Image (cartoon, rainbow, N blue to C red):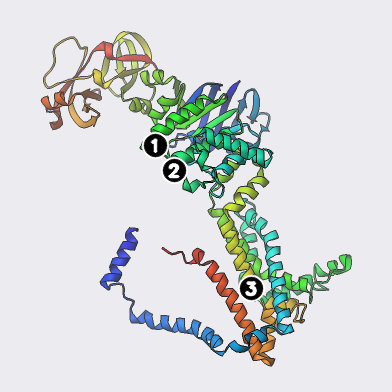
Amino acid sequence: MSLEAELGLTLGRLELEVELAVETGELVVLLGPNGAGKTTLLRALAGLVALDHGRVALDGAVLDDTGSGAHVATEQRPIGFVFQDYLLFPHLSALENVAFGLRARGLARAEARRRAAVWLERVGLAGYTGSRPRALSGGQAQRVALARAMVSDPRLLLLDEPLAALDAASRTEVRRDLRRHLASFDGTRLLVTHDPLEAIALADRLVVLEGGRVTQTGTPDQVSARPRSRYVAELVGVNLYRGRATGAVVEVDGGGTLVAAGDHHGEVFAAVHPHAVALHRRAPEGTPRNVWAGTADTLDIVGDRVRIRVTGPVPIVAEVTPAAASELRLADGGPVWASVKATEVIVYPA
Amino acid sequence: MTAAVRRRRADASSGRNRAPVLFVVPAVVAVGFLAVPLVGLLGRTPWTSMATELATPRVLEALRLSLVCSLGAVGISLLLGVPLAFVLARFEFPGRNLVRALTTLPMVLPPVVGGVALLLAFGRRGLAGQWLDRALGITLPFTTTGAILAEAFVAMPFLVITTEAGLRAMDRRFEDAAATLGAGRWTTFRRVTLPLVAPSLGAGAALCWARALGEFGATITFAGNLPGVTQTMPLAVYLALETDLDAAIALSLVLLAISLAVLVALRDRWFPTA
């Protein structure tokens, strides 16, 4: 019982080629930069965009199969869709918005309204049944959209950036509620976001989509520990290199070498956390196996840490305390030495 | 307040925005040219005898007929024009631009030419009229139905154009949302699309009605000028000019009042206040 999709389509400049499986009960979050094709993928699963080729099946029932020509129209699919800007019908009240799906699926007016009212109460909006969408706050509109998508008991719930339209203040609260409502849903859930925090807070499993392709999948911990693309590395804030390993030595693509612990061979990724990078004004002596001379370049303050980009044979970002930064006068730039212990270089196959 | 508006207000207060004489003079003449006839009409209106002028059987008959014909024309336009606007707005098909040009042609066509064309098509010996007459025994020229058709021919484009523009401007993702909620095409159209384009549709219908109400050329050519059958208000005004000037003025005033009412009803659409 799950969603299985393997599809390809071209839309403008986007070439989407994706294989995706979501188990029932699992909350999969699709994470990716803008323009990666996340929304298009959701729309394709909903049947709102035609596939060039591929197959989509939900709980064993085929929704799309370009091989056999099978296609279930959007309105016949057992899905719930929360759109990025919610798309609540502006001419209908909150109650009528939620009841819309039940009415469209043939339920009598009174019964549809009764069930819609139950759902509005469930999302904490019992007092807003008569409100028009424009009278609702962003958080309230989001909850109406969620109730509208879930009221007819779909088997597949698709959520497109459900928190993106909210301001930071209401986001935390709405996210907590969203988490609770998603937890109570017993079908298959797929949520799209470009916000890594949201992804990590909500996901059982992350699927990273870049340029129409899945570049990485795994639990949030797995993905952040072993990024497989520059995009993910930057999101989780690690230095990521790609290269060829021979034993403990990694020849980095683009020049330079890294010495790691252990024994690796072939194409690999090497990840170094910025806090594992030490900076010195003079050539250091000691155990670190990786030492380069470079130039302190840009400086960023991240929380109570200072991040310094060091250019050199292997460009790297180091994270130090403000005290250390001022002691070494890193704000002035100039030559520095960077060192990393071999045990801090994490190497994994590419 | 946008930067542009701020700048304009600043210009106005500093006097840099004063219009040059070269433009002011023709502009004043233009306003006068447009306003003087209306003032003339109002000045010459027999206010005291208005009620009696309007209460004559001939005037009342023309009023009734005008309402019947113009509302009938709006009805036909809604029934046929809304689906046409939907097809034009939503579907790609070969010759779509040609169809759109054809639909809007009556807006620029001299109404008399429209009347002649209608006569040639639906007249007793016309292309379609011949068949209607023989097969169904339906005669259109010089009947009330004929007057309704003539008005619909001239007025429908206003509804089609306005509605199509509304359909194009609408965010179609609302229709996607309806589909994900289980609504088929018809339910979506009825419960989402139509309500969302209701303002455009209303404006289109009002324009269509105003145009139908004032229709003269096509009606008199195709349907004739038979009192109680095809003699609508504009036709009655024209006829009354020769026999009873006061009645003509009274009827004109009614038409003017209706036009003003339509203008006021649509003012937010055409002259949105900043």
Identify the residue position indicated by label 2 in the image. Answer: A137
> Reading the chain from its start, which is encountered first: label 1 or label 2?
2
Quarter of the view holding residue B46: bottom right
Q: Position of residue B103 (x, y in %)?
A: 65, 64
The chain holding disc 1 is: A
Image-based side of A304 in relation to A280, left or right? right
Q: Amino acid at mark 1?
A: Ser
- Please tell me whether mark 2 sits on a helix, a strand or a loop: loop
Image-based side of A202 in relation to A9, left or right? left
- Please tell me whether mark 3 sits on a helix, a strand or a loop: loop
As measured in the structure, the alpha-carbon distance from the residue carrying label 3 to the one carrying label 1 is 58 Å
User: Circle 2: is it few (<14), some (14-19), or many (20+) Cα within 10 Å?
Assistant: few
What mark, if any, has residue A170 been given in the picture?
Answer: 1
Q: Position of residue B238 (x, y in %)?
A: 67, 85
User: Circle 1: is it few (<14), some (14-19), or many (20+) Cα within 10 Å?
Assistant: some
Identify the residue position indicated by label 3 in the image. Answer: B109
Q: Are marks 1 and 2 in contact (CB under 8 Å)?
A: yes
Q: Are marks 2 and 3 in contact (CB under 8 Å)?
A: no
Please state, as top left, top right, bottom left or bottom right, where the N terminus of chain B lies in the image: bottom left
- Please tell me whether mark 1 sits on a helix, a strand or a loop: helix
Which label sits in the foreground, 3 or 1? 1
Q: Position of residue B212 (x, y in %)?
A: 66, 72
